[in-house]
Image (tube, rainbow, N blue to C red):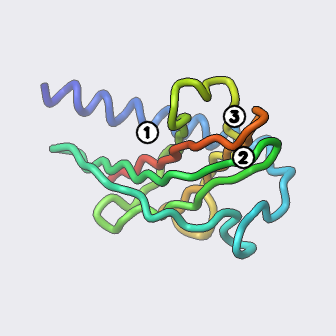
Amino acid sequence: MALSKKVFALAVIASAALATAVSLSFGSDRGSGGGTGASAPYPRGAGISRSSRGTRIRYLQARGTVQPGQDNGFSLKCPKSAPNAVSGYFYPARKEALGKLVLSTSSPFGSSNRNWDIGVTGLGTEPEDFVVGVVCVR
């Protein structure tokens, strides 16, 4: 059982590193987005946190609403107990919204490994609720 947790943690870290490398190679074509400052394109999310035994993994989440044709999201900061942001994710708050939302941004920002920026764009004709999150590891 301990081996499978280590393999899972390594898989999460490896996939996050690959996603980061790919996202950094494409750069960013969006300015400061809907954010509050140049260093954080989106407002900070208050999120929730969970952890597993063994390797410290925390999942911070925040909920939001995106307007049709607009971009919205959050900038999440990992806690000191799991200070390495390795990946971001999102999902619609209701299953009927599948296909009406796309991930527009998922990348680290700032000078530390603790911050992750996640953006969602609405493709539908009405506002849609969404959940974004960041995986934090120690």
Residue at image point 70% right, 29% down: 100
SS for dot 2: helix
Q: Amino acid at mark 1?
A: Ile
Q: Which mark is residue 102?
A: 3
Q: Amino acid at mark 3?
A: Val
Q: Which mark is residue 71?
A: none
Circle nearer the viewer, 3 or 1? 3
Circle nearer the viewer, 3 or 2? 3
Q: Earlier in the sequence, mark 3 or mark 1?
A: 1
Quarter-wise, where is residue 97 in the image? Answer: top right
- Viewer-proximal residue among 80 and 75: 75
C-alpha span from label 2 to label 1? 16 Å
SS for dot 3: strand
- Viewer-proximal residue among 81 and 73: 73
Screen quadrant of the N terminus: top left
Measuring from the top left, give residue 110's x and y in whole percent. 62, 68
Q: Which residue is mark 1?
A: 13
Residue at image point 61% right, 24% down: 98
